[in-house]
Image (spheres, rainbow, N blue to C red):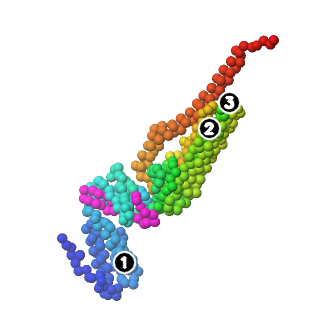
């Protein structure tokens, strides 16, 4: 079906600024723009321009308005008559999560779903719509983007009539780091910030370590050196050797890394001391320019008490995204236990290296999941197992100390009893 308004438009290529038909062509184009908008059920913004005489104020603006009308019609040409109104963007400036609320019901009925598009999308960029209640709205998660690229996200509702009007974000960039290596973990609601971070954990040395492909932002890095081995005592000495010292923990929360490979070195725990020897020192851990030296070995005991090896530097940091944790001496970089008699000292534990950086923003659903997992940890479930292991090691250390003290007291008591019951010889 045709409309009289689409007939008789002069060839735009034959109309010059000074020709008599120039203004008439403007008017005809504005009329056709309005007609096209009505046919696809959209409201032109800005409205189709009024006639403007060449040289008078408003003529150039009429050109600009016509161009804007053409772009809008091209963008929303798929809109169905009776489709839902455009959603209302909560953050029209864009971002890795674009939130929106419903624009209301269309003539064709209530909104039953939402769709989204991203431009450009020639590098695998994706958008994922997450909606719990179409009558309320939802979120669009933007992933696989490239830094320093201008993106525009379009969101629209759908009802039984078809696709409704669209809402588009401003052009925005997502300039985040990208890297691979070690054990990779995505942490939502990082330390309660609503941010999405990526954490790389190295528990063994890796010459390729962290391979950085994009580095527009700083990185957070923690390294912990290996713990020193525990000392022992000389044969039949009355006092046990000293504990090995914990490795040094060093953190840098604003480290600039270049694109390329950054090897990770994880220091091994020092060997436990044998009879007549101190415990071995722990190895240093490092990643890029961040270095944590290993702990000292425990000294040898004999017939006089000895001190434990000095502990390395400990730090409290929330680099893993689950709140503040103490590092060095707890699980990683711990000093080895001492020994008595002919037993050797215990080895120290190896160190660790951790790298973390933001990669986006968590969705509401991801934040809720992260909060549930945090509550489980606080209740002793899930990764709370690690805390239990740590507490067990501390308890074991205390029990060993207590047992050694009991044995020493028992031996001393037995020796004294022997002396008391030994018969005396009369002097002649």
Q: Are marks 2 and 1 in contact (CB under 8 Å)?
A: no
Residue under pointer 2: 274
Residue in view at x 23 percent, y 76 percent:
6
CA gap, disc 3 and disc 1:
98 Å
Residue under pointer 1: 63
Which residue occupies the extreme right position in the image? 428
Residue 15, percent from left and from top: 30, 85
Whether residue 194 is visible, yes or no, is no
From the image, which quarter does the C terminus lie in?
A: top right
Of the numbered discs 2 and 3, the one sitting upstream in the chain is 3
From the image, which quarter does the N terminus lie in?
A: bottom left
Residue 375, percent from left and from top: 46, 41
Q: Comparing marks 3 and 1, which lies closer to the viewer?
A: 3
Residue 216, percent from left and from top: 50, 62
Q: Are marks 2 and 3 in contact (CB under 8 Å)?
A: no
Which residue occupies the extreme front position in the image? 428
Residue in view at x 58 percent, y 46 percent:
226
Whether residue 166 is visible, yes or no, is yes
Q: Comparing marks 2 and 3, which lies closer to the viewer?
A: 2
Judged from the image, the secondary structure of the residue bearing numbered disc 1 is helix
Q: Who is closer to the viewer here, 216 or 360?
A: 216
Residue 371, percent from left and from top: 45, 45
Of the numbered discs 2 and 1, the one sitting upstream in the chain is 1
Residue in view at x 42 percent, y 46 percent:
369
Residue under pointer 3: 238
Please determine whether, in this image, residue 322 is positioned above or below residue 7: above
Position of 47 compared to 264: left or right?
A: left
Q: Who is closer to the viewer here, 362 or 268?
A: 268
The magenta-colored residue range is 143-168
């Amino acid at each position: 079906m045709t409309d009289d308004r689409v007939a008789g438009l002069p060839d735009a290529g034959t109309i010059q600024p000074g020709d008599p038909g120039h203004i008439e062509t403007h008017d005809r184009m504005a009329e056709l723009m309005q007609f096209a908008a009505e046919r696809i059920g959209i409201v032109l913004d800005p409205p189709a321009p009024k006639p403007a005489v060449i040289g008078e104020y408003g003529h150039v603006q009429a050109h600009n308005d016509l161009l804007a009308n053409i772009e809008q019609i091209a963008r929303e040409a798929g809109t169905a008559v009776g489709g839902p109104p455009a959603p209302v963007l909560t953050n029209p400036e864009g971002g890795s999560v674009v939130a929106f609320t419903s624009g209301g019901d269309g003539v064709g009925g209530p909104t039953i779903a939402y769709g989204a598009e991203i431009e450009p999308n020639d590098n695998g960029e994706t958008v994922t719509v997450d909606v719990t209640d179409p009558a309320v709205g939802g979120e669009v998660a933007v992933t696989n983007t490239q830094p320093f690229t201008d993106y525009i996200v379009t969101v629209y509702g759908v009802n039984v009539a078809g696709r409704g009007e669209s809402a588009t974000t401003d052009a925005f960039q997502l300039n985040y780091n990208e890297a691979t290596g070690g054990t990779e973990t995505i942490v939502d609601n990082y330390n309660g910030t609503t941010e999405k971070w990526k954490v790389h954990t190295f528990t063994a040395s890796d010459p390729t370590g962290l391979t950085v492909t994009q580095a527009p932002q700083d990185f957070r890095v923690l390294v912990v050196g290996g713990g020193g081995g525990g000392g022992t005592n000389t044969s039949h000495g009355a006092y046990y050797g000293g504990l090995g010292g914990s490795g040094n923990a060093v953190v840098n929360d604003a480290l600039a890394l270049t694109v390329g490979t950054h090897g990770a070195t994880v220091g091994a725990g020092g060997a436990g001391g044998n009879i007549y020897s101190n415990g071995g020192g722990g190895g240093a851990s490092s990643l890029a320019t961040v270095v944590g030296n290993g702990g000292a070995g425990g000294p040898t005991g004999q017939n006089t008490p000895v001190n434990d090896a000095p502990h390395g530097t400990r730090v409290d940091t929330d680099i893993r995204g689950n709140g503040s944790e103490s590092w060095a001496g707890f699980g990683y970089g711990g000093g080895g236990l001492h020994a008595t008699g002919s037993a050797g000292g215990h080895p120290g534990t190896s160190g660790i290296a951790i790298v973390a950086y933001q990669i986006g923003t968590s969705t509401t659903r991801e934040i809720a999941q992260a909060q549930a997992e945090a509550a489980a940890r606080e209740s002793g479930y899930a990764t709370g197992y690690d805390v239990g292991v740590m507490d067990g090691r501390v308890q074991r250390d205390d029990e060993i100390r207590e047992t050694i003290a009991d044995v020493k007291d028992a031996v001393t008591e037995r020796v004294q009893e022997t002396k008391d019951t030994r018969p005396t010889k009369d002097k002649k």
